[in-house]
Image (spheres, rainbow, N blue to C red):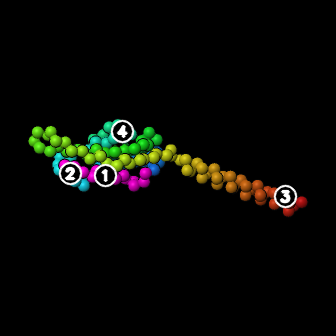
Amino acid sequence: PVANATITPSPPAHQVRAGDPVTLRCSVQVGSAPVTFTWLHNGREVARGPVLELGNVSVGHSGTYQCVATNQLGQDGHRVFRALSPELALEVTSQGHRETVAAGVVGSLLFLVLLMGIIVAWHWWH
């Protein structure tokens, strides 16, 4: 039999930025060899094996991931055991969004400080 399939993401965050590498590892607490692993992304099969390397992720990698662990018992292979992991939700944000917002805020503040300095200097000279 096979039981208690779990997914361990690396990095451990569920939100990553586009371009970052992501690795998902599937493991089982109980499982007689040989155990095979199948990966599902949004319910569709995308890969086989205990490790899913997503490489440089894009927004299209967002969604839910599940691992299906399977093994067959007996020489005839008629008894099949499956363990489905809980879903792992992965959100990929477009790269540079936070930096763009931060740069805009800093730029606006710098402009306001400069404007205040000009107004104060003008009043002081007149």
* Label 1 or label 4, whichever comes before in sequence order: 1
User: Does residue 122 appear anywhere in the picture?
Assistant: yes
Left or right: 103 as drawn, with respect to 64: right
Task: Give the labeled residue for mark 3.
Answer: 122
Q: CA distance from mark 1 to mark 3?
A: 67 Å
Left or right: 6 as drawn, with respect to 120: left
Pointer 4 local density, CA inside 10 Å: few below 14, some 14–19, many at least 20? few
Q: Is residue 121 above or below residue 77?
A: below
Look at the numbered discs 3 and 4 and tell me whether their residues touch, using CB distance below 8 Å: no
Please tell me the numbered disc located at residue 31.
2
Q: Amino acid at mark 2?
A: Gly
Residue 108 coordinates in the image, percent (x, y)? 68, 52
Look at the numbered discs 3 and 2 and tell me whether their residues touch, using CB distance below 8 Å: no
Task: Give the labeled residue for mark 4.
Answer: 43
Task: Give the labeled residue for mark 1.
Answer: 6
Let me know if residue 11 is in the magenta part: yes
Q: CA distance from mark 2 to mark 1?
A: 12 Å
Q: CA distance from mark 1 to mark 4?
A: 16 Å
